[in-house]
Image (cartoon, grey):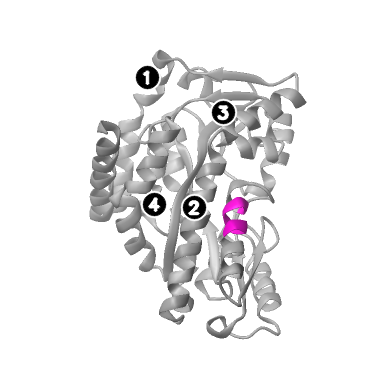
Amino acid sequence: MKSSALFTRTAAGALALGLSTAAFADTWRYAHEEYEGDVQDVYAVAFKEYIEANSDHTLEIYRFGELGESDDIMEQAQSGILEFVNQSPGFSGAWLPPAQIFFVPYLLPTDEQTVLEFFNESEAINEMFPELYAEHDLELLKMYPEGEMVVTADEPITSPEDLNNKKIRVMTNPLLSETYDAFGASPTPLPWGEVYGGLQTGVIDGQENPIFWIESGGLYEVSPNLTFTGHGWFVTASMANQDFFEGLSDSEQQMIREAANVAYDHTMEHIQGLADESLEKIREDSDEVTVTRLTDEQIEAFKAQAPQVEQAYLEMTGEDGEALLEQFKADLEEVQSN
């Protein structure tokens, strides 16, 4: 559910009031989708520290809810109200269909080091995606993984049959809905700000997120059965408004790219071991939590549904999606062979 146009206009006015245009601003603005201390915030803080240490500019960080939901901050970035934005393909997939590739289940492996190496070296990630974002007036700075997706529900999940008719919250992403439909669930789009209450009241029966977000958002309190299905990773992207970026000097553009590289390296170090730490905190806080890690045999039952989702992806994205998927698989094969 997208926040109201009135909210967006109000936020836009508040941000614009008394500020010079982006091209001449000494204060730049960066909005992301998470809470203080979460992965996107870790990236944003490292990005801010590098910018401020290497220029006369300052960077203001806006966290979840301060300027609205994810759709709101993207609209503000594309219109130039924000210089920088961090948004997951889970939301951008609606207007950038090829970005939904991350919701083809079982495409990415579960091994953390393999995933990190893939993002470092992938031609699909580092060469093809920037071109796709540029078509929407965005300068892609970095695309990066945050953590393996974990499903929480009102009871343990061990098979697709356990998801039959369960209302599972999904982001506003057509392919993610296809995935949970293939798994047998009833995909239910819901803004992040309504997920906790939706789980608490039974509006939804479950949801998926990386474990650190399940911990920081307290979702385990109202959805205590955690299942590691191994079906995918939560991925996000850091971007700049393209007009703003192209209006900067070459040296400032280079400084921003260096800031993105430094923030990326810092964040990739941060996420290593984060899932285990978050799960330990959850277990320490609650005796009601159950943790299910699917066996290889159980995973195969879910994985058997993946081809129909991949086919749906190709139908949604056409030639761009086909080329991206082909390169994505080739990049993965090369990383895994090494």
Quadrant (top left, top right, bottom left, bottom right) of the C terminus: top left
Furthest residue in direction front, as rendered:
53
> Quick one: label 1, few (<14), some, or many (20+) residues within 10 Å?
few
Badge 2 or badge 3: first in the primary sequence: 3
Alpha carbon distance from label 2 to label 4? 19 Å
Q: Judge from the rendering whether residue 24 lies leftward or rightward of residue 143; answer left or right.
A: right
List the residue tagged with mark 2. 264
Amino acid at dot 1: Glu
Badge 1 or badge 3: first in the primary sequence: 3
List the residue tagged with mark 4. 99
> Quick one: label 3, few (<14), some, or many (20+) residues within 10 Å?
some
| Along the viewing direction, whichever of 283 and 225 lies nearer the viewer | 283
Amino acid at dot 2: Tyr
Badge 4 or badge 3: first in the primary sequence: 4
Residue at 54%, 58% in the rendered image: 86
List the residue tagged with mark 1. 300
Alpha carbon distance from label 1 to label 2? 33 Å
* Residue 206 pos. (x, y %): 61, 32
Alpha carbon distance from label 1 to label 4? 25 Å
List the residue tagged with mark 3. 166
- Mostly what secondary structure, the magenta segment? helix
